[in-house]
Image (tube, rainbow, N blue to C red):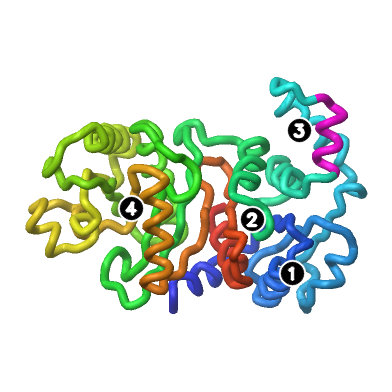
Amino acid sequence: MSILEKIRQKASKNLRKIVLPESDDERTIEAAGLILDNKISRLVIIGDDSAREKIKSKNTDLLEVINPAAYKNIEAMASEYYELRKLKGMTPEEAHKIVMTDYLIFGAMLVKENAADGFVAGANHTTPDVIRAALRCLTIDREIGVVSGAFLMEVPNCAYGENGVFIFSDCGVNPQPNARQLSGIAVSCATLFQKLVGKRPIVAFLSYSSKGSAEGELVDKIKEAVSRAKQMAPDLLIDGEFQADSAIVPEVAEIKVGKNPVAGHANVLIFPNLDSGNISYKLTQRLANARAVGPLLTGFRKPASDLSRGCSVDDIVDAVAATAVRV
């Protein structure tokens, strides 16, 4: 059984309520039917009655369709959204209009108000759109202090990581994270790995250097991030800096690093910047025929997930399952 099948199965054992705000996307509608048929989660679809009619499933008791214009708590939601944004110059009238018409904001506010457990969007919105909605509505975990975009990667016929399963981060949010941000990303992604995979996270900070084999400001930044992460979470297996092969290949790690509990065994890979993270996940996805689920947004107190605009129906189903098991 693949890790994604296991995550779907795990989600079905404790049904959470996940918001899908893009009811105008055909893939989202099709995915909703599959999610309900397989009882992966409860769903909240944002839209009118036509959305309900399009979703074909025998388990409609798990489905709630909400039209913002008819939502009974719309005034309270608008007021709360105004409070969140008033320091940015938003008026009460603007707040009311936005929650009525912007389905991403409305969906994120449902999560904010505990009317849902998480949300998944991005099938027909850009990553900045989805992240902006999450940042405006959801509460950031102050202990982590940074929002990032992680991918669950499942590489077929791979002996590295957790039998080919990895978390890659940050692949979607921070262009040039500093040492403090990298440490928060590492700790949050260790938690993400534990929740999704159910195995011990082994976290490696990646670089062009393996334990002092090279020098430079970028290496110094990674060393500082490692130190900070260990202070934040002393019980986690975290180390670096490692080149990618030193992080995941035991034989290479033995040569380059020597005995080390992380080197050669890492299943959570923390990239030094967005360029390297985004490029690496896409190359792994295409060249190794890997499944990539995400970006799974970390650093919030409640789960949210982005989607690629080129996502498949299965991608949406898996993102919902992954979001549900994080609650």
Tag 3: Cα neighbours inside 10 Å, few (<14), some, or many (≥20)? many
Left or right, 8 with respect to 162, comes to right
Question: Which residue is identified by label 2?
Answer: 122
Choose the circle earlier in sequence order: 4 or 1.
1
Choose the circle earlier in sequence order: 2 or 4.
2
Nearer the viewer's eye, disc 3 or disc 2?
A: 2
> What's under tag 2, amino acid-wise?
Gly
| Residue span colored magenta | 91-100
Left or right, 255 with respect to 277, comes to left
Residue 160 image-quadrant placement: bottom left
Residue 293 falls within the magenta-colored stretch: no
Tag 2: Cα neighbours inside 10 Å, few (<14), some, or many (≥20)? many
Task: Give the Cα separation between the discs numbered 4 and 1.
Answer: 34 Å
- Under circle 2, the secondary element is loop
Question: Which residue is identified by label 1?
Answer: 26
Q: Position of residue 30 (x, y in %)?
A: 71, 73
Task: Give the Cα separation between the discs numbered 3 and 1.
Answer: 29 Å
Residue lying at 54% horizontally and 72% vertically, measured from the top left: 9
Question: Which residue is identified by label 3?
Answer: 81
Task: Give the Cα separation between the discs numbered 3 and 2.
Answer: 21 Å
Viewer-nearest residue: 203 or 243: 243
Task: Give the Cα separation between the discs numbered 3 and 4.
Answer: 36 Å
Question: Which residue is identified by label 4?
Answer: 269
Tag 4: Cα neighbours inside 10 Å, few (<14), some, or many (≥20)? many
The dominant secondary structure in magenta is helix
- Counting labels gives 4
Query: Do the numbered discs 3 and 2 sit on residues whose CB atoms are within 8 Å?
Result: no
